[in-house]
Image (cartoon, rainbow, N blue to C red):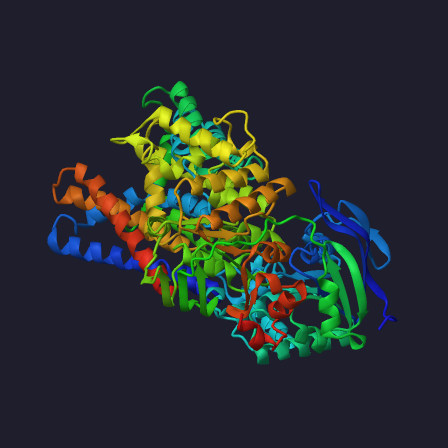
């Protein structure tokens, strides 16, 4: 199945998986509390949201963009679910639909800003991030609301160590993996990410591909917010904040190039789990949580170095 | 060969860039099974004409007919859908994709929304075989050699089953054997009724593959003939022979006999090979040739933007290692780059800020800029070069090309250079400013500055240089005194056809 460029793209994920396995092995070796089934279960649950956002982020990184608005889309999604889902099934469906619609709309604005008005992706997505954050704070100035109990307990159901949320996330990974590597749309995304000019000359509809990609990212980010709301059971206008940077870090650690056109969602998954693991491990060893940031920073620099060196060697 | 059915016809095509007419009333007819060689000097309008025919550029006026019906191309994609494919010279495949995926980009075989990877590669393989080359379709495009990339570009163009294929210098990165295979391919597609246009400066290529020669000069059609009825001498004489429209300053009198710069067998990768030359103090040395023969790499290596891969670079008899523009500037070297908007100027800044970039140390004390000294320096610079600005605070981006270029010169003159490297110094500059720049350059030389002028404008080369070196495929193919140079001689060296070098080198 790994034919042509797919093999090369998937291979980008290998270092991340090696690092991931190494962290798990070392932590299990040195921390007895880490290797308990409870902690592992806990940590799988913790990984889910970042893993979802990492799809959204990798998606736009593939076409050479970036999406900083994911954080606000997540926050506002938790608010919609917390405000409208509690009383009825209709409210639940409506709130989910509303969250997804806002996510898609944000993506549409980002995409159109990038292709029509030539605004750098970083700038337009920071703008929509700020705008949505304002809306979220007006709707719900501090954590509040209630999430439909049936819905949140459904998402928390388990098969083995995996919650339903984790299983849905995994299925999404499979779907996106297939889309990136085995469909014409995925091929167009990689072409756009590598060289928009050349893609256009080869007959790829660059603008449409770009806009759709941003919309898909918005949708996935909104879904991540919905899943997050079932974990925290409330809405929160700031709960998504850390995910913008963490998702970029997860994707990059997973071998997705920030220059576009290189990497695989397989790596983003490993990257997301690594970033979550860092928190978990630091907690398990009883180290001050402030070291989380230092460690995350170091891991990010280290993985960028690895990819730079690999690239230099291949040139 | 005038009997084939007409596939594409351009009638009375005109293209202007602002007031600059680059293509004037040219008509061209491409027939089934006919190969046209499009020849002319740099800037004759060849590429412009081909861009118009292939939809990449809209004509200012004139008509294009495909199969006898008038069309207005909305894009190069539109032209491609009508069977016109342009194999560009700039090589730009997607490095992260395989050869097969590149060739089949946007015409991939698929099943629903899914790609058929196997079929993509097998079809690409067939296309490559048709062309006569055997490149592994599973290799990454990023790993290919320039020659292989060129072949893949051709395969990509051919994959859309074109009826008119346009090649821009297709053999420039191919070796002899590869070129011959390409020619065999061209003969085969001709036999199938495909029409071919080949831009080329290699006379051998033209005589090997083409049926008709089509000569452009200064954007105008000058000559067309069946290849069988003409000679390379005749073609060259048709290409050249422009009039000297500009007055050049008299040649230099400065002669100290000292050599300022010596290059001994310098190479820059494969682009520049074994170049040796001497630049005396106070002289203007011109480097000419067709575009892309290594001039760009040579001048950028001289200024430290690129590195020499081997050979010696001596200034005043001392070997120097110039590894960055910074170290070049410390050696009193100045460099006027060809792309002033990107490299020569900071467009959104003022004239003052641009002129003073390199002399801030001179006008400041303990790191604090002295306003009055800065103003004096800038005012002096503006006056010296007759730069037309209302105010030194005016932004450079709003100046004309000529005034912008004067700002670049002014910036460098402020550093009191001993050596001045000029790369296309008058590109996009109006006639008046051109004259001023020429006399400025000459007056600098008269003060002892050694000037090396890299230009593709042959008249400028002849008019300004005391000595001329011509580059062809990275090597020096000829060396002439400025007084002896004629366009015809230079063209011969440039096209690599001439073996008269021997006598000329002894100047």
Horizontally, residue B495 falls left or right of residue A98, namely: right
Residue B498 location, quadrant: bottom right
**Camera-side residue of A187 and B222:** B222
Q: Residue at x 32, y 21 (%)?
A: A142
> Which percent across, then down, holds residue B481?
56, 64
Q: Is residue A93 visible?
A: no
Q: Is residue A25 visible?
A: yes
Q: Quadrant of the C terminus of chain B?
A: bottom right
Horizontally, residue B131 falls left or right of residue B417, namely: right
Residue B357, compared with residue A251, is above or below; it is above
> Which percent across, then down, holds residue B461?
59, 57
Q: Quadrant of the N terminus of chain B?
A: bottom right
**Camera-side residue of A266 and A199:** A199
Residue B416, compared with residue B390, is above or below; it is below
Q: Residue at x 41, y 54 (%)?
A: B303
Q: Residue at x 85, y 70 (%)?
A: B4
> Which percent across, then down, holds residue B432?
63, 40
Horizontally, residue A71 falls left or right of residue A291, namely: right
> Which percent across, then down, holds residue A171?
42, 51
Could you tell me how many numbered marks the image carries?
0
**Camera-side residue of B484 and A81:** B484
């Amino acid at each position: 199945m790994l034919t042509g460029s797919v093999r090369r793209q998937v291979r980008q994920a290998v270092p991340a998986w090696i690092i991931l396995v190494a962290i798990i092995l070392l932590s299990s070796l040195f921390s007895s509390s880490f290797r308990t089934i409870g902690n592992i279960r806990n940590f799988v649950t913790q990984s889910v949201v970042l893993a979802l956002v990492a799809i959204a982020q990798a998606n736009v990184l593939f076409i050479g963009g970036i999406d900083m608005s994911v954080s606000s889309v997540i926050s506002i999604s938790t608010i919609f679910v917390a405000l409208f889902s509690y009383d009825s099934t209709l409210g639940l469906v409506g709130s989910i639909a509303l969250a997804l619609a806002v996510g898609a709309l944000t993506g549409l604005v980002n995409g159109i800003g990038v292709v029509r008005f030539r605004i750098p992706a970083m700038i337009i997505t920071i703008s929509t991030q700020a705008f949505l954050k304002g809306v979220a704070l007006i709707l719900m100035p501090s954590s509040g609301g209630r999430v439909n109990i049936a819905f949140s307990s459904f998402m928390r159901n388990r098969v083995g160590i995996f919650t339903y949320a984790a299983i849905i996330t995994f299925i999404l990974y499979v779907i996106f993996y297939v889309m990136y590597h085995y469909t014409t749309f995925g091929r167009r995304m990689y072409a756009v990410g590598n060289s928009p000019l050349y893609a256009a000359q080869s007959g790829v509809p660059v603008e449409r591909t770009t806009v759709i990609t941003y919309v898909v990212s918005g949708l996935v980010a909104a879904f991540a917010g919905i899943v997050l709301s079932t974990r925290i059971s409330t809405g929160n206008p700031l709960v998504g904040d850390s995910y913008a940077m963490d998702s970029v870090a997860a994707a990059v650690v997973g071998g997705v190039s920030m220059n576009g056109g290189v990497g695989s969602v397989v790596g983003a998954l490993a990257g997301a789990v690594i970033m979550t693991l860092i928190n978990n491990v630091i907690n398990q060893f009883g180290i001050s949580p402030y070291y989380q940031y230092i460690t995350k920073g170091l891991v990010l620099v280290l993985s960028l170095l690895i990819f730079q060196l690999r690239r230099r060697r291949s040139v | 060969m005038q009997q084939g059915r007409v596939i594409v016809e351009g009638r009375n095509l005109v293209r202007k860039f602002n007031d600059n007419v680059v293509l004037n009333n040219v008509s061209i007819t491409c027939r089934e099974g006919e190969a046209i060689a499009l020849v002319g000097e740099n800037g004759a309008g060849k590429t412009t004409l081909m861009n118009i025919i292939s939809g990449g550029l809209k004509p200012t006026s004139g008509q294009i007919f495909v199969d006898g019906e008038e069309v207005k191309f909305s894009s190069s994609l539109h032209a491609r859908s009508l069977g016109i494919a342009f194999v560009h010279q700039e090589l730009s495949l997607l490095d992260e994709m395989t050869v097969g995926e590149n060739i089949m980009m946007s015409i991939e075989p698929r099943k629903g929304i899914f790609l058929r990877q196997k079929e993509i590669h097998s079809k690409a393989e067939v296309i490559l075989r048709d062309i006569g080359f055997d490149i592994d379709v599973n290799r990454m495009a990023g790993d290919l050699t320039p020659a292989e990339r060129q072949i893949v570009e051709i395969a990509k163009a051919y994959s859309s089953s074109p009826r008119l294929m346009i090649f821009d210098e297709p053999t420039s990165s191919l070796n002899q054997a590869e070129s011959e295979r390409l020619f065999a391919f061209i003969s085969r597609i001709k036999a199938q009724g495909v029409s071919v246009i080949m831009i080329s400066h290699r006379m051998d290529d033209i005589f090997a593959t083409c049926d008709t020669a089509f000569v452009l000069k200064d954007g105008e059609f000058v000559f067309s003939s069946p290849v069988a009825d003409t000679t390379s001498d005749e073609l060259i004489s048709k290409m050249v022979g422009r009039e000297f429209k500009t007055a050049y300053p008299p040649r230099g009198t400065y002669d100290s006999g000292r050599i300022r710069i010596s290059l001994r067998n310098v190479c820059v990768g494969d682009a520049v090979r074994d170049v040796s030359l001497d630049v005396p103090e106070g002289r203007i040395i011109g480097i000419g040739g067709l575009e892309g023969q290594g001039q760009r790499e040579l001048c950028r290596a001289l200024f430290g933007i690129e590195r020499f891969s081997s050979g010696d670079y001596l200034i005043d008899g001392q070997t120097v290692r110039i590894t960055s523009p910074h170290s070049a500037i410390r050696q009193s070297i100045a460099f006027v780059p060809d792309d002033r908007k990107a490299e020569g100027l900071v467009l959104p800044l003022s004239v003052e800020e641009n002129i003073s970039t390199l002399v801030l140390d001179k006008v400041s004390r303990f790191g604090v800029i002295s306003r009055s000294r800065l103003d004096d320096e800038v005012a002096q610079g503006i006056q010296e070069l007759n730069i037309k600005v209302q105010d030194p605070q005016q932004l450079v981006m709003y100046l004309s090309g000529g005034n912008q270029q004067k700002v670049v010169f002014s910036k460098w003159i402020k550093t009191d250079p001993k050596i001045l490297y000029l790369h296309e110094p008058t590109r996009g500059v109006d006639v008046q400013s051109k004259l001023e720049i020429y006399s400025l350059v000459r007056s600098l030389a008269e003060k002892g500055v050694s000037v090396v002028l890299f230009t593709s404008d042959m008249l400028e080369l002849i008019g300004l240089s005391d000595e001329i070196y011509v580059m062809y495929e990275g090597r020096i193919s000829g060396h002439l005194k400025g007084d002896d140079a004629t366009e015809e001689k230079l063209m011969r060296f440039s096209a690599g056809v001439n073996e008269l070098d021997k006598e000329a080198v002894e100047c």
